[in-house]
């Protein structure tokens, strides 16, 4: 009988607390941030580490769903004084160019479970409590259940100011706090969660706006890719004092956490398929501790087991999946990125593998770097010619970009997506296993 791999594994954001595993320290930090009356929560880290999934769990905790905290052994951190919120959740995109674009989107978002507009009281819509959790007794929030004849007309309690979207946003927030947070739901605060915050091209002024609006009744949580907070918030000095309890740097998972991903998947599959310990260990080593890649490999293992009509996944099946990755059959999206990067140049292909095999760790921020001077010596041994002619394509936006230059020092680069770096290592192992001084995954 075929098993749907999506039941146990997903590459999507994890919203259900029963599927979320690990991250006890990060959850503790997030809870501290929620319980700080005037702080900003900032979740940041590399691609593929599960930042958005963590932010969704922050939303669950904010509305009073503490199942995940209990599962993580943090029950003792929950008290009668734990703050509760009404929440707004918005995922930014690259079409948002600046602060005005962001506030315009927030003021016009009609999502009936996460949007700001759903919370504005007026005669044109009906609001009810709903549960974000499976247990109706916890996780209560508000959502629109019916749009009335007046649609999204907001003149009764919240005034839209013509040609001043920032003031309109302020009016909306103040109205929500007064009529919904305090009067109706009797919560402590409104929590506005902004995911993929890093994609906003010009963040000037947003930090100042967050600072001016933050109060015991309004809190912001932002999430995005970054090595530190300066990558995430352009005018970060405006919000530095708000981050004493709310900065959460999400790293890769340890072995125990990756094991938990697979044990949770087994439960979701109702033990119809099981993973041997050595198989999970092999996946952990090849995923680099990135939950996104571990989930992808787990899903492929289930698909392979289904083809073989096997109910147990061991290292043999994992090896078969890794063989498919090596030949480019397993992950079409990553493979397209790989082919786009190398083009029709065998020298660029070898150069990409040589750079992916590099693993110098910056002692200051823990980020992996590629040192071009080290690559040059290996490239000569491998017969790679014209490095300076082949490198630019890997830096061009229209081909990825695959790499970015480090602003700190000339000749130092970093992979934009560490998942892709790991994929290149797996994609064609014979290109990297013999490189001097490098031990591939």
Image (spheres, helix red, strand yellow):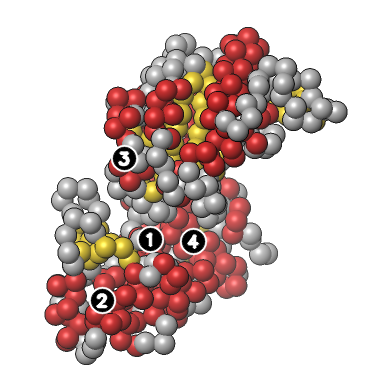
Question: Which image quadrant: the N terminus?
Answer: bottom right
**Closer to viewer: mark 1 or mark 3:** 3
The image's mark for residue 229 is 3
Q: Residue 349: image x %, image y %? A: 34, 82
Alpha-carbon span between mark 2 and mark 1: 16 Å
Question: Which image quadrant: the C terminus?
Answer: bottom left
Q: Residue 33: image x %, image y %? A: 38, 25
Few, some or many residues within 10 Å of mark 3 (<14, 14–19, 20+): many
| Secondary structure state at the residue bearing disc 3 | helix
The residue most toward the front is 163
| Secondary structure state at the residue bearing disc 1 | loop
Q: Earlier in the sequence, mark 2 or mark 1?
A: 2
Alpha-carbon span between mark 1 and mark 4: 15 Å
- Residue drawn at 50 percent across, 34 percent down: 193
The image's mark for residue 354 is 2
| Secondary structure state at the residue bearing disc 2 | helix
Q: Nearer the viewer, residue 262 or 211?
A: 211
Q: Earlier in the sequence, mark 4 or mark 3?
A: 3
Query: In which quadrant of the rendered view does residue 65 lie?
Result: top right
Q: Nearer the viewer, residue 51 or 73?
A: 51
**Closer to viewer: mark 1 or mark 4:** 1
Alpha-carbon span between mark 1 and mark 3: 18 Å
Q: Which residue is mark 4?
A: 296
Q: Which residue is mark 1?
A: 417
Q: Give the left or right position of residue 199, taking residue 103 as reference.
A: left
Q: Residue 253: image x %, image y %? A: 35, 48
The image's mark for residue 269 is none
- Residue drawn at 59 percent across, 39 percent down: 105
């Amino acid at each position: 009988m075929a098993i749907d791999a999506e039941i146990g594994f997903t590459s999507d954001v994890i919203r259900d607390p029963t599927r979320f595993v690990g991250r006890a320290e990060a959850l503790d930090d997030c809870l501290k941030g929620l319980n700080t009356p005037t702080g900003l929560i900032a979740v940041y880290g590399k691609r593929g580490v599960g930042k958005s999934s963590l932010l969704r769990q922050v939303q669950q905790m904010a509305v009073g769903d503490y199942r995940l905290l209990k599962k993580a052994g943090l029950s003792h951190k929950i008290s009668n004084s734990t703050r509760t919120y009404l929440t707004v959740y918005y995922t930014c995109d690259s079409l948002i160019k600046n602060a005005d674009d962001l506030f315009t989107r927030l003021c016009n978002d009609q999502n009936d479970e996460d949007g700001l507009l759903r919370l504005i009281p007026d005669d044109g819509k009906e609001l009810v409590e709903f549960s974000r959790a499976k247990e109706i007794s916890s996780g209560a929030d508000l959502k629109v259940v019916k749009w009335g004849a007046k649609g999204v007309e907001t003149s009764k309690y919240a005034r839209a100011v013509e040609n001043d979207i920032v003031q309109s946003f302020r009016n909306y927030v103040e109205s929500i706090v007064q009529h919904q947070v305090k009067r109706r739901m009797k919560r402590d605060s409104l929590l506005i969660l902004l995911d993929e915050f890093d994609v906003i091209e010009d963040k000037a002024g947003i930090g100042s706006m967050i600072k001016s609006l933050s109060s015991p009744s309004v809190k912001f949580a932002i999430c995005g890719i970054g090595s530190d907070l300066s990558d995430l918030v352009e005018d970060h000095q405006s919000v530095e004092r708000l981050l004493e309890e709310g900065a959460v740097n999400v790293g890769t998972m340890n072995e125990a956490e990756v094991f938990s991903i697979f044990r949770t998947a087994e439960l979701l599959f109702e033990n119809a398929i099981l993973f041997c310990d050595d198989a999970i260990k092999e996946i952990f080593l090849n995923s680099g501790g990135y939950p996104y890649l571990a989930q992808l490999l787990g899903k492929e293992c289930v698909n392979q087991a289904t083809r073989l009509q096997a109910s147990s996944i061991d290292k043999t099946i994992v090896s078969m999946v890794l063989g498919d990755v090596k030949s480019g059959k397993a992950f079409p999206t990553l493979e397209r990125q790989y082919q786009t990067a190398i083009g029709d140049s065998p020298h660029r292909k070898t150069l990409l593998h040589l750079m992916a095999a590099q693993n110098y760790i910056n002692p200051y921020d823990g980020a992996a770097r590629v040192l071009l001077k080290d690559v040059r010596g290996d490239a000569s041994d491998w017969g790679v010619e014209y490095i300076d002619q082949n490198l630019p394509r890997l830096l061009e936006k229209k081909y990825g970009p695959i790499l970015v230059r480090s602003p700190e020092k000339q000749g130092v680069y970093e992979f934009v997506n560490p998942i892709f770096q790991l994929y290149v290592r797996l994609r064609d192992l014979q290109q990297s296993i013999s490189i001097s001084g490098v031990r591939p995954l």
